[in-house]
Image (cartoon, rainbow, N blue to C red):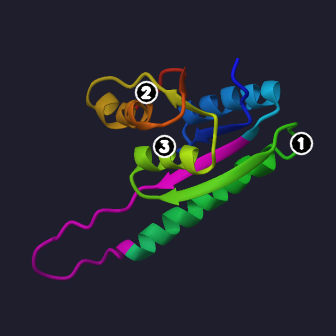
Amino acid sequence: MLPIRKIVVPTDFSEPAREGFRQARELAEHFGAELLVVHVHAPVEIIPAGHGTVAFNVADYQKEMEAAAQARMQEIIAAEKDAPVSLTPVMRKGNVAEEIAAAGAEHNADLIVMATHGYSGWKKLLLGSVTERVVRTASIPVLTINAPSVTA
């Protein structure tokens, strides 16, 4: 088996992502690997609303989303403080799939472990496409975890 020293595990803080994290942590424990917990902030697209003023401040919203994600990431790290695995939080901005693949390459990771899930219909096209794109574009191996089905 290949030596596995660093594992990237992306999270959007969903239940399927938590299952992917649990599996990645188990692999990291087995191999004595470092776990890089990656969250990507997708930019909020601004759509012109026509004439008049809009009472929604996109910049403030983006800052609040980033602060909330940072807090949730710290919760994950704090909950694992006694784990026999080294966890490193990685926060990135941009296209989610591209940034996950780039994080793996930039951190010289050996493996990406990420969940896929049981959404169906149009939701699978929207949400499952991130995993599919990472599998197709990453320069390192990607292990997908078939997390329990999630209903919306």
Q: Name the residue that disc number 1 marks.
A: 82
Q: Name the residue that disc number 3 marks.
A: 101
Q: Magenta span covers which residues?
A: 35-58
Image point (55%, 45%), residue name: 105
Image point (40%, 75%), residue name: 59
Q: CA distance from mark 1 to mark 3?
A: 28 Å
Viewer-closest of 20 and 138? 138
Where disc 1 sits, the SS reads loop
Q: Are marks 1 and 2 in contact (CB under 8 Å)?
A: no
Viewer-closest of 90 and 60? 90
What amino acid type should be assigned to the residue bearing mark 1? Asp
Where disc 3 sits, the SS reads helix
Q: CA distance from mark 3 to mark 2?
A: 27 Å
Q: Is residue 119 above or below residue 80?
A: above
N-terminal label among 3 and 2: 3
Label 3 vs label 2, nearer the camera? 3
Where disc 2 sits, the SS reads loop
What amino acid type should be assigned to the residue bearing mark 2? Thr
Q: Name the residue that disc number 2 marks.
A: 151
Q: Which mark is residue 47?
A: none
Q: Main secondary structure of the magenta part?
A: loop
Viewer-closest of 65 and 29? 29
Circle 2 Cα neighbour tier, 10 Å, few/some/many (<14 / 14–19 / ≥20): few
Q: Is residue 113 above or below residue 74?
A: above
Q: Is residue 124 magenta?
A: no
N-terminal label among 1 and 3: 1
What amino acid type should be assigned to the residue bearing mark 3? Ala
Q: CA distance from mark 1 to mark 2?
A: 32 Å
Q: Is residue 44 above or below residue 23?
A: below
Q: Are marks 3 and 2 in contact (CB under 8 Å)?
A: no
Q: Is residue 100 left or right of residue 2?
A: left
